[in-house]
Image (cartoon, helix red, strand yellow):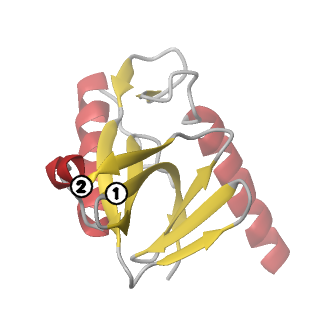
Amino acid sequence: MIMKNLFLITTLFFITSTVFGQQKNNNKYQLYEGGEKYPKLQRYVFLDEENKKDKNISNVSFVIGGEIFKYIASRHNRDTVSVSKFRDLNFSTIEELKIDEYQEHKKRTKEAGIKMPPPPNHYNVKVYIVEKICGEKAIKYEVDWLFTIH
């Protein structure tokens, strides 16, 4: 029974990843192959002391509010930002990310005249994790929003 469920979940994830997968232009997404391209929402999340960070040579994983985000050096950008720029960023909570993601999906499917449930992957939001590293600097990681753990 467990293997059957695991197989179904893996198959569902593969299908939705294929349909909603990363485009060559990582700043846009499509609801379906050949459909209109929409700009991804850009959201910033602040990494504080309560959140977990796991780092190895080329990857960094973040666990924030029960959500897992991953920075992969070969695929994502990482940049240093000054505190003045840091203060200009509009930070979102995890709950706000989820609401924004759902509202974007609802809006675009309505515009396209199609009805489809939101997929399990987070295809329409580009997330940046911002970590303050010292008094005047912070690091901004472009990340993939992988999944929820509860």
Q: Residue at x 45, y 77 (%)?
A: 66
Q: CA distance from mark 2 to mark 1?
A: 6 Å
Question: In terms of depth relative to the viewer, which is nearer, 101 or 144?
Answer: 144
Instruction: Give the left or right position of residue 106, taking residue 30 as reference.
Output: left
The residue type indicated by label 2 comes to: Val
Instruction: Give the left or right position of residue 74, taking residue 97 as reference.
Output: right
Question: How far from the left and from the top, in percent, is residue 17?
Answer: 62, 42
Label 1 secondary element: strand
Q: Quadrant of residue 22?
A: top right
Q: Residue at x 57, y 41 (%)?
A: 76
Question: How far from the left and from the top, in percent, is residue 143?
Answer: 50, 50
Label 2 secondary element: helix
Q: Which residue is mark 1?
A: 137
Question: How far from the left and from the top, in percent, is residue 95?
Answer: 27, 68
The residue type indicated by label 1 comes to: Lys
Q: Which mark is residue 83?
A: 2
